[in-house]
Amino acid sequence: MSADATKDLARAIAQDCLARRIRQVGRVVSGVYERELRPTGVTIAQFNLLVALACGLGTAKVLSERLQLEKSTVSRNLERMAQLGWIASRSGEDGRSVELSLTAAGRGRLRAAHPAWQRAQAAARDVLGPDVLKHLEGLAQALPR
């Protein structure tokens, strides 16, 4: 394939690629949350894990599955959060799993970051607009869990 044909192919893919579009929207929205949360010392990834743990999702495996994240990504974030004193771990009843929970510091961090999250929510809604939000909700409901 010639260089020009390759360039034409690449342009067609770039113009039509759903993954590229979705990732671009994700980066824009994530950037909104990261900017608002930065002063609280929490990343959006950590915030989502704090929320999930507060809701009772207590193992790295369950977190990974429910949040649809790579286990290594979850483990890396959990390790950092444990170092910061936000989460505690203990052996699960089966002796193999590790049960995770928020510490008082983790609960406090979640509460302290909540106003920044609220600002990020409002800013993200403004960036996306009502039509996109409506479609996004429908899309989220239609995705396999």
Image: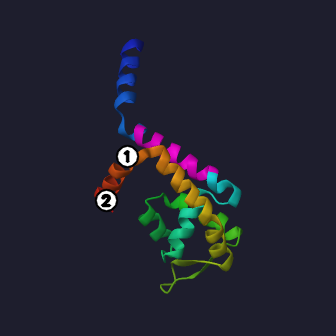
Residue to which mark 1 is pinned: 132
Residue at 51%, 79% (x, y): give it: 96
Is residue 31 in the magenta section? yes
Is residue 5 in the magenta section? no
Residue to which mark 2 is pinned: 141
Q: Which residues are magenta?
A: 21-35
Q: Are marks 1 and 2 in contact (CB under 8 Å)?
A: no
Q: Element under label 2?
A: helix
Residue 34 in the figure: left or right of residue 62: right
Q: Quadrant of the rendered structure where residue 67 is?
A: bottom left
On the question of residue 113 being in view, the answer is yes
From this viewpoint, which residue is outermost toward the bottom? 93
Please name the amino acid that badge 2 sits on. Answer: Gln
Residue 81 in the figure: left or right of residue 58: right
Instruction: Estimate the spatial distance between the alpha carbons at disc 1 and disc 2, rounded to whole Å.
Output: 14 Å
Q: What x and y, as percent, mark residue 74?
A: 54, 62
Residue at 58%, 56% (x, y): give it: 119
Q: What x and y, as percent, mark residue 66?
A: 42, 66
Residue at 34%, 31% (x, y): give it: 16
Residue 42 in the figure: left or right of residue 141: right
Q: What x and y, as percent, mark residue 41?
A: 69, 60
Between 73 and 104, the one lying in front of the other is 104
